[in-house]
């Protein structure tokens, strides 16, 4: 009797463990099954590299190239802004505040602030971006483009707003991961560098950060994944026209394309949206693969 | 001369570091103050306890609050046992091998998938293939996949900190493995498990993209207590979804900021609780 109970328990736990595998397989299968047909119906080159998006016109065009481009450019720019700020904040948290009680208090307050920033729902970032950032961008836009014949005014809902919101949203991820990998760098490395006459900053930038490289890279890649996958916040601030990703253009990302059109799309239009989802999913899977590689490298380095 | 130049560049770097460190604090303070300033005036008893009524001209989010709670309950009802079970399998039963790395890789992948993809999958699979449509159940089933890694990981971490002596002691006294897990391991790992559960609840409260196409946006209250069970099969928009709709298609920014205040209070409270718990957890771990 006891034996039966034991093996039942074991199999129940096994099933619980397998749920994750089944989920990933099911999601992957569905994304490909639903996303692939449109690739053949519209033609992969026209779909992926077409620049005209007119899904509801009498002669519909389904080109998502600008959408892919916007996602890539928006993500890269936000990472370019967010990573330096995040990395320097991590340096402050770990190496500049650990020598005095006051410093440790400041560091604690800052860590809590970062945690809370991470906890704020993305719609709130979107709401504030909509109310604060967009009017600001509109002023800039008017400053630059008054008198321009070709510029389409966006009221500030543009690429730049989206990049700023994304940069803010990836900040906690970058800070946390960088800080923990900088903390993991052995104290003796720091002492050795200081003893050789390097200043504190030289030690941080020439010794500590290079030693924490793989952990920091993990943070960067995670940040890229977060920025690429963010939907609601940037849907509220980026305008929503399919355009070249220029700073003052109203743009659409892979994610916002789904948010804004999935509710009413039908037929081939809907299938093309599934393809948009598939493109996003493939991006994310590649990022996950890079992450696993990085983690393995990190583990090896620690051994 | 070179030394002086070096100092100047160091000063510049110090300035940059302090500036960047200030960014997070200033941002957080600004967001909190801005949301409170814009949203506090919307927080009235009518706003919190009634449903929007066009006839009376009032706005209320009670329906969205109930929907949010229902989605949390249904999601956690399934996600908690599955997540804990997976962690127990990985930590206590499995021997290192292909299956373990596959489960771990899958968990890792799940935690990296953005919520909009979960939403898309949930809509296609639970909503259309299984025919559940836009409903709280569809939303919850989708969110299970999303919060599973959080619970599994936190439980695993907690199980790792339970000393092997506990396990050997129980087995040595003649307890079966299942009995040992039930009476020794799970209670010892409880703070970690609860932390995972609360983190998952926080994630659900803040979630929007995964729910837009799965749970829908209805905001009516269930008509009676038993109506709650019907409600699970009907469309229901959470607080975040209502915030999104208020700020975009409805253009009602006062309500949007009102909801933002409610959401901030909830997520900050959750943050506080997890912090307290992890601290307690650390204390018990250090005393071992």
Image (spheres, grey):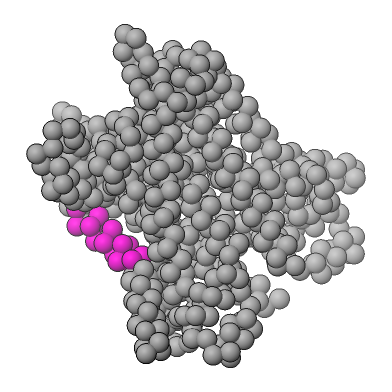
Quadrant in the picture for the N terminus of chain A:
top right
Name the one closer to the observer, B54 or A191.
Answer: A191
What residue sits 41% from the left and 89% below the top? B3
Picture quarter containing residue A141?
top left
Quadrant in the picture for the C terminus of chain A:
bottom right
Q: Position of residue A203 (x, y in %)?
A: 53, 80
What residue sits 44% from the left and 12% below the top? A267
Decide whether residue B36 is among the magenta residues.
yes
Decide whether residue B178 is among the magenta residues.
no
Tell me if I can see residue B287 in this picture: yes
Dominant SS in magenta: helix
Q: In this view, does A141 lie above or below A256?
A: below
What residue sits 43% from the left and 34% below the top? A68
Which residue is the extreme one toward the left? A147
Name the one closer to the observer, B268 or A268.
Answer: A268
* In this picture, residue B200 sits left or right of residue B217: right
Q: Position of residue A103 (x, y in %)?
A: 42, 83
Q: Is residue B6 above or below residue A240?
A: below
Name the one closer to the observer, A65 or B201.
Answer: A65
Q: In this view, does A132 lie above or below A281?
A: below
What residue sits 64% from the left and 55% below the top? A294
Q: Is residue B45 above or below residue B34?
A: above
* In this picture, residue B275 sits left or right of residue B152: left
Name the one closer to the observer, B259 or B114.
Answer: B114
Q: Specify start and end residues of the magenta stretch as a single range.
A: B23-38
Q: Where is residue A131 in the image (x, y as percent from the top left)?
A: 21, 47
């Amino acid at each position: 009797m006891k034996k039966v109970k034991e093996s039942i328990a074991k199999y129940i736990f096994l099933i619980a463990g397998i749920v994750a595998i089944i989920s990933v397989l099911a999601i992957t299968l569905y994304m490909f099954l639903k996303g692939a047909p449109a690739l053949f119906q519209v033609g992969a080159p026209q779909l992926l590299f077409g620049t005209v998006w007119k899904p509801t016109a009498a002669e519909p065009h389904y080109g998502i190239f600008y959408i892919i481009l916007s996602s890539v450019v928006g993500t890269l720019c936000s990472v370019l802004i967010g990573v330096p700020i995040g990395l320097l904040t991590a340096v402050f948290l770990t190496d500049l505040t650990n020598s005095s009680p006051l410093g440790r208090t400041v560091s604690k307050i800052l860590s809590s602030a970062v945690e809370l920033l991470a906890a704020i729902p993305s719609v709130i970032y979107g709401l504030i971006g909509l109310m604060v950032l967009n009017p600001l961008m509109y002023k800039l836009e008017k400053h630059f483009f008054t008198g321009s014949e070709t510029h389409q005014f966006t009221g500030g809902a543009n690429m730049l707003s989206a990049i700023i919101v994304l940069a803010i949203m990836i900040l906690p991820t970058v800070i946390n991961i960088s800080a923990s990998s900088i903390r993991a760098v052995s104290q003796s490395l720091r002492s050795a560098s200081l003893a050789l006459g390097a200043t504190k900053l030289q030690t941080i930038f020439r010794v500590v950060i290079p030693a924490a490289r793989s952990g920091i890279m993990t943070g960067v890649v995670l940040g890229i994944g977060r920025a690429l996958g963010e939907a609601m916040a940037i849907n509220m601030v980026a305008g929503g026209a399919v355009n070249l990703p220029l700073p003052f253009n109203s743009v659409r990302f892979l994610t916002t394309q789904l948010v804004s059109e999935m509710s009413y799309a039908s037929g081939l239009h809907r299938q093309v949206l599934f393809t948009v989802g598939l493109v996003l999913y493939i991006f994310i899977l590649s990022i996950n693969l890079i992450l696993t590689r990085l983690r393995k490298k990190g583990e090896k380095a620690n051994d | 001369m070179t030394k002086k130049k070096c100092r100047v560049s160091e000063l510049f770097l110090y300035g940059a570091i302090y500036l960047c460190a200030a960014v997070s604090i200033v941002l957080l303070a600004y967001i909190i103050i801005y949301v409170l300033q814009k949203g506090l005036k919307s927080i009235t008893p009518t706003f919190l306890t009634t449903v929007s009524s066009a006839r009376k001209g009032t706005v209320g989010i009670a329906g969205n609050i109930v929907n949010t709670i229902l989605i949390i309950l249904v999601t956690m009802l399934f996600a908690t046992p599955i997540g804990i079970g997976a962690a127990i399998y990985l930590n206590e039963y499995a021997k290192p091998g292909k299956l373990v790395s596959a489960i771990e890789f899958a968990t890792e992948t799940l935690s990296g998938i953005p919520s909009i993809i979960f939403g898309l999958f949930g809509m296609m699979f639970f909503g259309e293939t299984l025919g559940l449509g836009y409903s709280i159940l569809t939303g919850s089933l989708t969110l299970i996949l999303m919060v599973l890694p959080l619970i599994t990981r936190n439980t695993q971490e907690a199980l790792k900190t339970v000393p092997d002596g506990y396990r050997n002691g129980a087995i040595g006294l003649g307890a079966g493995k299942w009995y040992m897990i039930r009476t020794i391991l799970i209670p010892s790992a409880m703070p970690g498990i609860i932390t995972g559960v609360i983190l998952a609840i926080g994630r659900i409260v803040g979630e929007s993209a995964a729910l837009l196409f799965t749970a829908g946006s209805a905001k009516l209250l269930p008509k009676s207590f038993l109506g709650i069970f019907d409600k699970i099969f009907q469309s229901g928009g959470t607080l975040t979804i209502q915030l999104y709709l208020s700020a975009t298609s409805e253009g009602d920014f006062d309500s949007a900021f009102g909801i933002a205040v409610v959401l901030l209070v909830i997520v900050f409270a959750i943050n506080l609780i997890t912090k307290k718990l992890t601290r307690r957890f650390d204390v018990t771990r250090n005393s071992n």
